[in-house]
Image: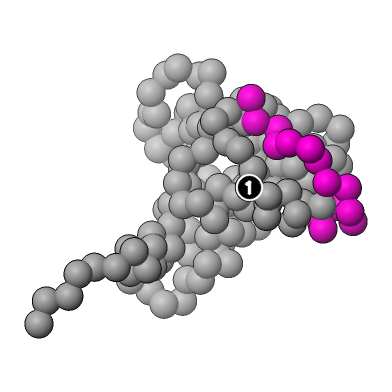
Amino acid sequence: MELPVTINEVYYLLERWAMLTIWDAFNLDPAGEKHPITLEGASPHYHVYDCGSCLVAAPKDLFTYKRTLEDALNTARAMACEVYKRNWTIEFAGFDKMVRAAWLELQLLADKHGHALDILHFEARPEDLKLYAFKLGGNVPTKSSSA
């Protein structure tokens, strides 16, 4: 019996093998040699690499069931903290939930430190803005900080 692959099955695979790249948008150098980095808060189930013009996160073991979605989200948040320290103008590429977690972390860091990073080609969804407002205790921004 042959059944078509469903959208839910494809999304399951994307979630199981979630990856995230955060680009230094105005650094026009191609991604260089990868250097493993250890970030506070990143999951031990993820590799994080500094490739010069971008940071990349990828699961260590694609087939383990020890890794959860929370591992992906924690790693995305840790990467957001790192690019915030580097003061990059950024672009995201990767699994949508990781992108959204990184965006939210960057908004919270901007509120804490009084400086927002420019984020290109990203528009926060209404539910992202609601979550951001909840984390802040009710202050809803009128738009995302994307350029």
Q: Is residue 8 left or right of residue 101?
A: left
Is 128 placed above or below 11 here?
A: above
The residue closer to the viewer here, 61 or 76, is 76
Q: Is residue 63 left or right of residue 110?
A: left
- Any part of residue 44 in sight: no
- Quadrant where the N terminus is found in the figure: bottom left
The residue closer to the viewer here, 97 or 35, is 97
Is 85 placed above or below 58 here?
A: above
Tell whether position 59 is magenta: no
Q: What residue is drawn where x is 83% and y is 46%?
A: 140
Q: Position of residue 79 (x, y in %)?
A: 60, 45
SS label for mark 1: loop
- Quadrant where the C terminus is found in the figure: top right
- Residue 28 falls in image quadrant: top left
Q: What residue is drawn where x is 58% and y is 67%?
A: 70
Question: Disc 1 marks which amino acid?
Answer: Arg
- How was the colour assigned to the protein in this rendering? one colour
Q: Position of residue 118 (x, y in %)?
A: 67, 27
- Label 1 CA crowd tier, 10 Å (few <14, some 14–19, many 20+): few
Residue at which label 1 appears:
125
Q: What residue is drawn where x is 82% and y is 52%?
A: 133
The stretch of residues the image draws in magenta is 134-147
Q: What residue is drawn where x is 33% and y is 69%?
A: 9
- Any part of residue 146 in sight: yes
Numbered disc total: 1
Q: Position of residue 117 (x, y in %)?
A: 70, 30
Q: Position of residue 80 (x, y in %)?
A: 64, 43
